[in-house]
Image: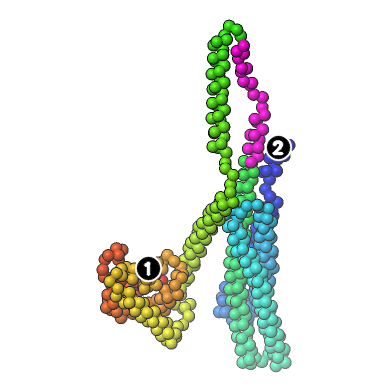
Amino acid sequence: GGEAADEAVEKPAPAVDEAIRYAGEARAAAERVAACAHRAVRGGEEGKEAQSMPQRRAFRLLRELTRRGISELQDAAGQLRILAQAVDGTVKCLESALADKKETSVAEIGLRDRATMVEDAGRSSATSAELLEKIAEATEATLRKVDAADAERGQQQGRQSGVRGGGDANLLRLGTRLLGESLARIAAIARRTADEAIGGAMKALDLSKGLTAMDLEARKERRKEAAKKNSFGDDDAPMAAPDAPKDHGDGDDDGEGGADGEGAEGDNGEEDESKGKNRQKHEEPQRTPRDQLKSAAKRVKERHVALRVKNLLFLSSLNEEAMRAQARLRALLDRSDGALLPEVSVAAKARLFELIAQLLDSALAECGRLSASPAAQPARVLERCLGFVLALEHGREIAMPTDSRTQALKLAGLVDKDLLCQVLGGPFRQRLLAAGVPRRRDSAAAAGPPPLPGHGHRSRSSGAGLGL
């Protein structure tokens, strides 16, 4: 019986095994989507190379590559639906495993939050599958039109006894362009879909691992409980009996025995009293409703603190992920020499810097008003009025500032960094000095003009001081 109980304690919950199986299916589906995307991207590259071939040969090759691309999109859509079902199954297994929990732990709260994100990833995969099917249908319709036009052109050539006109070349050129655009679109959507599928599968795997870890901890706790119960049963083992009390009724030792008997009785009485006092000390007093309320409030406060710490860690990881994505995007833009950047019109640039001027004028007016008070501390005035400017110092550490004014300054730095440095180092600096606001240093007592983000090294062109 004890061995069967130990095996029951050691065996994982069925929902955990189901979650692991669903997560494995999600990973396999994501791998197949990635394989489809790889073949689609390779077809797009071959389509680009086909543009340099003779028109007739390029047209035939592009038509075949487009058919393959349509097939890859359809296969990827089917695998995305399998992925969505597997992700949904993983979330349901988690909910089933947590349904029997009587107490809510911090780990359980974290798993529920992750389950929400995994569920969103599953719905996104299903939506992407529908999008892929629609794109495949539209591309197939384009291919049918091109095939029909090519067949009609062949019939016209037969009636004209092989005499080619200028319309033949135009038709081939148009068909080649349409098929090339279709291949490029297929490659782009397949690449994005593969990234999404891999992300969803990774989230499902992380969720299953978290559920497995929580179930392992629960099984450890059950083993400890079982060990405690088994240890309690050892108290029933045979024990040696205590020594029998001495008989003090013998006549030879009446005097001594009587004295000893009285002393023993006195000692026993004192021991009983001390034991009773110790029991009263160790006995827990009955908890009043007020004590219960305080205990519940303490537990709620501890839970809120744990949630706050978890949210801070989650935001920190999101910030690091966004910073890495920004770094990759910045490197891509640097390699393209600005070719990927959208064109900014003169009117849009004028509106942006007009907004920057209004923000700086408002901040300077507030600085002048607050610095007029003799009791005002310069460092506090600077941080209160120009905090959105000083926040640019942390541009390399924070992916997206929360203040919309700081976001406007970062956008202005991306559009025209040199002009922003001129604005900050010219009129703004002069008006700030005229307002009497001291420069911000590490010590609040130091005086001087504030440091201008991005303007400390005018010879640089990378905008590192702006935090962009």
Q: Is residue 79 left or right of residue 442?
A: right
Whether residue 78 appears in this view of the structure is yes
Between residues 24 and 395, which one lies in front from this camera angle?
A: 395
Residue at image point 61% right, 59% down: 112
364 in magenta: no
- x then y, percent, for residue 373: 30, 73
Q: Which residue is mark 1?
A: 393
Q: Amino acid at mark 2?
A: Glu
Q: Identify the secondary structure beneath mark 1.
A: helix
Question: Relative to residue 33, is residue 265 depicted above or below?
Answer: above
Q: Residues within 10 Å of mark 2 (few under 14, many from 20)?
A: few
Whether residue 425 appears in this view of the structure is no
Question: Relative to residue 294, is residue 32 depicted above or below?
Answer: below
Q: Identify the secondary structure beneath mark 2.
A: helix
Residue 78, located in which quarter of the rendered image?
bottom right
- x then y, percent, for residue 23: 65, 58
Q: Amino acid at mark 1?
A: Glu
Magenta span of residues: 225-249
Q: Residues within 10 Å of mark 1 (few under 14, many from 20)?
A: some
Between residues 289 and 179, which one lies in front from this camera angle?
A: 289
Q: Which residue is mark 2?
A: 3
Rendered image: mark on residue 263: none
- x then y, percent, for residue 261: 57, 16
